[in-house]
Every structure is written in structure tokens, then in C-alpha cells.
Amino acid sequence: MATVLLDRVTKRFGRVRAVDGVTLEVRDGEFMVLLGPSGCGKTTALRCVAGLERMDAGRIVIGGEDVTDRQPGRRGIAMVFQSYAVFPHMTVRDNITFGLRIRKTPAEETRQRTLQAAELLQIGELLDRYPAQLSGGQRQRVAVARAIVMQPEVLLMDEPLSNLDALLRLQMRAELKRLHRETRATTVYVTHDQVEALSLGDRIAVMRSGAIVQCDTPSAIYNRPASTFVGGFIGSPPMNFFGGTVEEGGRSVRVAGTVLGLEERWAGAEGIRAGGEVLVGVRPEAFEVTTETRAGAFPAVVVVIEPLGGTTLLTVSVDGETAKVTVAPDTDHDPGQRVWLRPLPDRLRLMEPGSGRAVIPTQEGARR
Amino acid sequence: MAAADEVPDLARAGRPRIEWLPYLLLAPSLVFLGVFFAYPLVQAFGLSFLRPEGGLTAEHFQRMLGDTYFRGAITNSLLLTAIVVPIQVAIGLVIALLVNSRFRGHLWFLYICAIPLAISDLAAGLIWLSVFTERGYLNTLLHMVGAVREPLTYLSAEQPVWLYGAIIAAEVWRATAIVMIILLAGLQLIPRDYFETADVFGAGGWRKLWHVTLPLLRPSLQTALIIRTILAFQLFATVITLSGRQVPVLAGEAYFWYGLYRNPHVASAYAVLIMGVSVVITWVYLRALRTREEEVAG
């Protein structure tokens, strides 16, 4: 196990900066998720850690040692590829032992570690099969077993679940989490799936255009997104943003003609001044929905009702803008119905309209 | 009666409708193969086994086997194939690997290596003749650097090593490119992830070649070997240009029996022999290098 440090890593492809001066420290035994839309540079960053890309600038430090100029095979890493890359001409056993054979591990140890890894991934019966005789999910397990049998200091995974069907993905997600708990290998995991990131990561580094825009625990990323981009990218449906005007020196904000009281911590925050424009960010589940007017609630019209089983999703129109609101499944709503939405004051976030950056409330600012 | 209408007509559904388009698209190739390959093949078989006045006979084969040139022809054909094909595959593989490593200028390298593809075997023979003949480039060069005073004779039966060497050089130069192209295409079909996996697990260049590249390249190696071996048995123009009949080969004998002795029956016997040997060798390759069903990349 080891820490991983990406130190001002830059990788260009022609004129495009795929990774642009990224610095990220992954703690010993941590499960770090690199999350972002396609083309944000997350896979390139991972490949820089693996040594599969030659960096234009920066260092990679693994376990305190600068490995920037080392070959991938000499970095103490193992990797699971998106395509699995399970060798078709080798049996499952030969695939799993591939790295051990290269390292000339003694036969008995190889045998034991192979059985152990196969056990852990529940592919013990498949050892003599060829990959073409396996399902996609089983091949995926072989790829993971091949990586963990190396007992790597650092395990790298590049979208390992994206080629599986939805149900299998759900299953494997839990398995990967269990596997990490059992092996405690420092893991860097790349995905574009925010649910995967939230469920797996000890921390998530959200990337956009080659840079990390926020790196924090899943709950912090979800509840306190650092920008409108993070708020919009994470969470399904994404965070709602309403245009508002600051009033009473930052003690309230006016949205859709309604005055919403703000918690005290916003008053002295940077970017909050009377008469200033702000974006008010509210998660779909962070509203109290009523059918009658009340203080701190703004009016909306129900447009679409989607029962999702566990919850019901309302698409509403607020002053001509669309917003998504989740409510309990047993509530009665009709299209065209007028409702009042009261954002829960402690779950409301403020963003600067121009930059999209989050306004940091005073206590949070002090806490950092 | 409405219910009866809803029952599908099983008889009609059971008879599949014939889709004519595929056959139509295949027709030109089939006609070509039929006229220029299947028909001559049947004819050659007929000529080699039939008496001119009718009736089956083995006398043409007996005549072929008893011919003074036969032993030399079959020995030379086998020997040249056994020497030339491995050299071609080895060099072709090295060039393909080099090109596939995408070093700076690799495309120019590829184009230059592929030039012999466009040159006919006769022309290739003439090019190498101009190198090895008494007043050829090799002697001129050796004379210029003062290595020899008198021009040496290479292409004579008294210098079998030189004679053989010249044929081998010409054949390797002429036909390595096709091996290289087939192997390069095969290499480019192997997903990059396999090589990167090998990198991550610490396999160096040789082990990567041995454990990953060559096994995954096996179908292309098989194709290249089969094509090259079959064509090596048909080796003719380069040998004739460089050696005349000093180095008899099977295809050359077929030509001489047809053109010189005006005996299409014995010529056909040679052709059938070449085909028989080709079929056997192809079968051996297919068996030895077969990719098992379960190993096919899925």
C-alpha cells in the first residue's frame, strides 16, 4: 500500500491540454475516484500514473518514490482496463498468473495466490477455461483477479464497469467495494458515472477540461458542490439553480418574487452584497412542497409527474424556468397544479452567476 | 371462419424465401474462378491421367518420375521453399514490427519496403541478374574497390552456392513485402490494450513479443505462411532468369515439358504434383497453427 501523488501533471495531445497541471494526493489505502464527463482528461491522468503516457510536465510519486521515469512494470501498480484486455490465447489461470510468471514468482506461491484471487473473485471453477467461453461479467472478474493477484501497492481501474449491463454493474460495484475493504490497496478509479463515484469513492476528484474542479468526500461533493458544474454533473436529477437577488445585506434572497430567508453564515460571505445577483442551488429532494402559500416558499406549476417507485419526480415550472423536485410517492399531484416550494435553508447553496463558483459561507470558510 | 384466417400458413412460412442478391454479387467471382481456375484444374487432372487416345494411365507420372531433371527439380523446389520462406517470414515480421512501432518516418520506410510488391517476378529476376551477371553491378563494385581484377562468374553450376544465393536473395527481396503487409495488417488488428496490459505487468520487449504479440498474430502468420509456401512451390521466373535450367524447379519443368517438349500430359503431371504438395503443406500449417475455437477473441 502506498500514497500516490500527481504533482502538477500536464499532458498535451497536439494543442489540446488533456491534463492541465493537475495536483492530487491519494492517501494510503484510499479509494479515489476520478469523475468527469468524457474528454475531461480523467483517463489520461490515470494513464500518466500507470506510466502509459509520457507526461509533458509534472511528477508522479508512488509510496514516496518519484516514479516519473520508470516503466509501467516498475511502479508497483496493477491496472484493470475498460476493455478488460484478458488475453484470449490464455486460460483464465494463465491470465491471472501472467504478472507473477513475468516476475518469476515461485510456483507454489503462484498457485496459492492464484487460488486466493480466484476465490476472492468467485471464479475458482473457471480457471481452465478460455476467455471466449466466459461472459462479460466473468471476464471482468478475471481482469480484476489478474490485477489483485499482484498484491499491488496501487490498483488502477479505468471504467471497469462500463461494459457491463445495468444489473451486473450494480452487483460488481458492491463487489469492488468489498474487495477494496479486504485488500486495502490504494485505488485510483476512473468513471463518468456519478452514482458509481458516490457509492465507491472515499473521495472523489471531479474533473473538467483537464483540471480538478473539486476533490472531497462523496457527501461533501453532493451537498456542497464547488461550482454549478459539479452541482449539475453530480446527482440525478441534477441540482436546480434559480436566479436570485441578495437583499437585507445578505440575510435573504429574492427568488421568483419571493423572499427566502438565509442562514446567518451567508451574510458575511465573499460575493454576497445587497442587490447582487446570485444563483440559488437546491437539490431536488431539498424542498418542502405544499399546495398552499407559506413564508419562504415560492410558487411553481407542476408540468410532469413521474412516479419512480421509491420517490416521485415532479417537473415544475418556476417563473418560466424548469426545475426538478422529488416528493414522497404517496403525494397527490396533477399536471397544471399550483404548488409552493420551500428550499430547506440548511441545504441551500449560493453560486456566483458569472463564474459559477460556489459562495463559501463564513463558518465553512473558517472551518477550512 | 375468421379464426381460420388468423392461423398462419405453416406450409408457406416453412419454405424460406430465396434471397438472390448475395448470389448475384458472388456470380462474377464465381465465373472468373470457374473459367480460369476450376476448368484448367479439371483439364490438368484429365491431361495428367488420360491417354491421348483415351483411358486412364499412370504413364505420364512414370515419365515425370523417370526424367533426369525430376529429382533435381523436386529437391530444389523443396530446398528453396525451406530456405526462402522462413527468411521471408522472419524479415517480414521484423519489418512489420518496426513499422508498427511507429518510429519517426515509419511510413516512408513502409513504402520503400513495399516497392517489390509492384514488381513482377520476371522483372525482379532481371534486376538481380544485372547485379550478379559477369559485367553486373556486383563485379563493377568489387572492381572499383579493388577487391577483384577479373570479373567473377557467379551464376554457373560450378558455383552452386552463389547460384543458390542469388536465387534466394532475389526471392527474399521480391516477396518478403507481401509477408510484411499481411503481418502488419495482423498487428494493427491487435487491440493496444493487450500490449499495455503486458507493459503494466512488467513484460519486457521479448516476453511481450513471445507471450502476447506472436500468439495473437497467429492467424496472420498462418495466412502469410500458406500464401508464401504455395507461391514458393510455383517459383519459376526468377529461377529461370538467373540460372536458366541449371537449377531445375517443378514449375520450370512443367513449363519446359509444355513449351519445349510439347507434352502437355507430363507438364500437367508436374502441375498436379505441385498442387498435391501445396495441399499437403497447407493442411499441415492449418493443423499446426490452428487457433482453437475457444481461443478466438470474443
Image (tube, coloured by chain):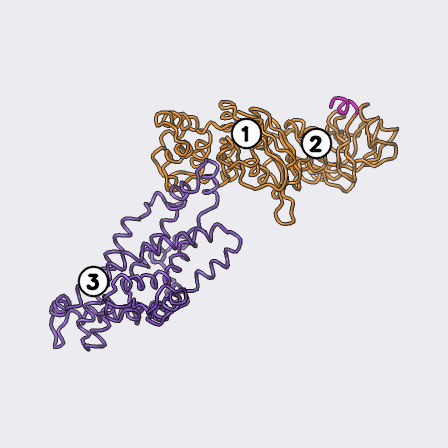
Chain colours: A orange, B purple
Q: CA distance from mark 1 to mark 3?
A: 64 Å
Picture coordinates of residue A113 (x, y %)? 40, 26
First-in-chain label (1 vs 2): 1
- Label ID, residue B74: 3
| Discs 3 and 2 lie in a common subunit | no
Q: Chain of mark 3?
A: B
Picture coordinates of residue B73 (x, y %)? 21, 65
The boundaries of the magenta stretch are A362-368
Left or right: B150 with respect to A16? left
Disc 2 marks which residue?
Answer: A225
In which quadrant of the rendered view does residue B29 lie?
Answer: bottom left
User: Are there few (<14), some (14-19), or many (20+) residues within 10 Å of tag 2?
Assistant: many
In which quadrant of the rendered view does residue A239 lie?
Answer: top right
Q: Amino acid at mark 3?
A: Ile
- Nearest-to-viewer mark from 3 and 2: 3
- Label ID, residue A187: 1
Majority secondary structure in the magenta region: helix
